[in-house]
Amino acid sequence: MDFILTYHRYSERSILIEWPQDIDENILEDIMLFKNYLEGLGLKSIVDIISAYNSMLIIYNEAIDNINDAFLTLKRYYIKRKLGQSQTSRLWQIPVCYDESFGWDLQEISNKNMLSKGDLVRLHCQAIYRVYFIGFLPGFLYLGGLNGRLHFPRKKTPRKRIEKGAVAIGGNQTGIYPNESPAGWHVIGNCPLKLFCPSNAKPCFAKPGDRVQFYQVSKDEHQKICTAAEAGNFYIKHGVVDD
């Protein structure tokens, strides 16, 4: 599927490309196809490419002298983006403890969405989510694909602090806070893994386009995984998916 894109000068050394303003898997796949194609060209003029829900920022190593020529070049690349492309992603299996000591907002969501806590956990674990982009905090995965029965508005007043690993729902999204931080989403559980390790060659285990599925663990299992992860002895289960 081809989309009508808009191209904007973002700064003297960058261009912002925008897709339709929707959270949509087809848009995500098209963004990743274009991004992978550009990265595969190995262009020395491009320093970095950053993708989001429906946009992509291209950062150049020098100021862009002729912006219209740069736009035309990118439009030609977009036409060619499917050449020789085969996209693969990973499906990551992420443990979550939904014990009430972690799930601070489980009761509120259960009551207002007319679900038992068991059904809430079951629905949260059933879905296979897509990683749309990584932001807000290093290693924070914006996950799309939340079951409509779990949609819940963000907090009117954010918490000043939530725990590292907090699994939360905000609107039609879910995600994991990789570190302690303020938070406007409703917390339903906790993930015991180290989700962002700046000392690693690949600091974040997942990338945009990957898939995530949660599975429930007990509080004792959570503690054991946490200890193993801190020691570097726990490896996230994953498989390869051909798109």
Image (cartoon, helix red, strand yellow):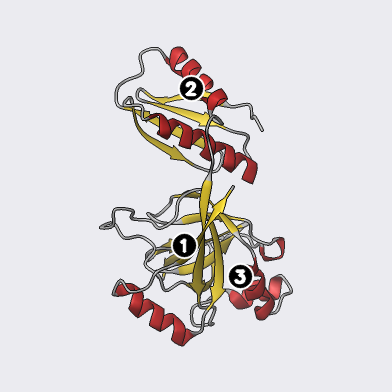
Q: Is residue 113 visible?
A: yes
Marks 1/2 in contact by CB < 8 Å: the verdict is no
Cα separation, mark 1 vs mark 3, equals 22 Å
Q: Examine the rendered structure and indicate whether residue 40 appears above or below residue 115.
A: above
Q: Is residue 10 found left or right of 210 in the rendered image?
A: left
Q: Earlier in the sequence, mark 1 or mark 2?
A: 2
Cα separation, mark 1 vs mark 2, equals 37 Å
Count residues near mark 3 (Cα–Cα under 10 Å), then give few for <14, some for 14-19, many for 20+.
many
Which image quadrant for residue 40?
A: top left
As drawn, the label of residue 74 is: 2
Give residue 214's position: percent from left, percent from top. Answer: 55, 69
> Furthest-right residue in view?
114
**Residue under the point 36% across and 30% down:** 42
Q: Examine the rendered structure and indicate whether residue 98 appears above or below residue 67.
A: below
Say which element carries label 3.
helix
Q: Examine the rendered structure and indicate whether residue 113 appears above or below residue 10.
A: below
Count residues near mark 2 (Cα–Cα under 10 Å), then give few for <14, some for 14-19, many for 20+.
some
As drawn, the label of residue 125 is: 3
Q: Which residue is mark 1?
A: 183
**Residue under the point 70% across and 79% down:** 116
Give residue 28's position: percent from left, percent from top. Answer: 57, 42
**Residue under the point 48% across and 22% down:** 74
Count residues near mark 1 (Cα–Cα under 10 Å), then give few for <14, some for 14-19, many for 20+.
many
Which image quadrant for residue 140?
A: bottom left
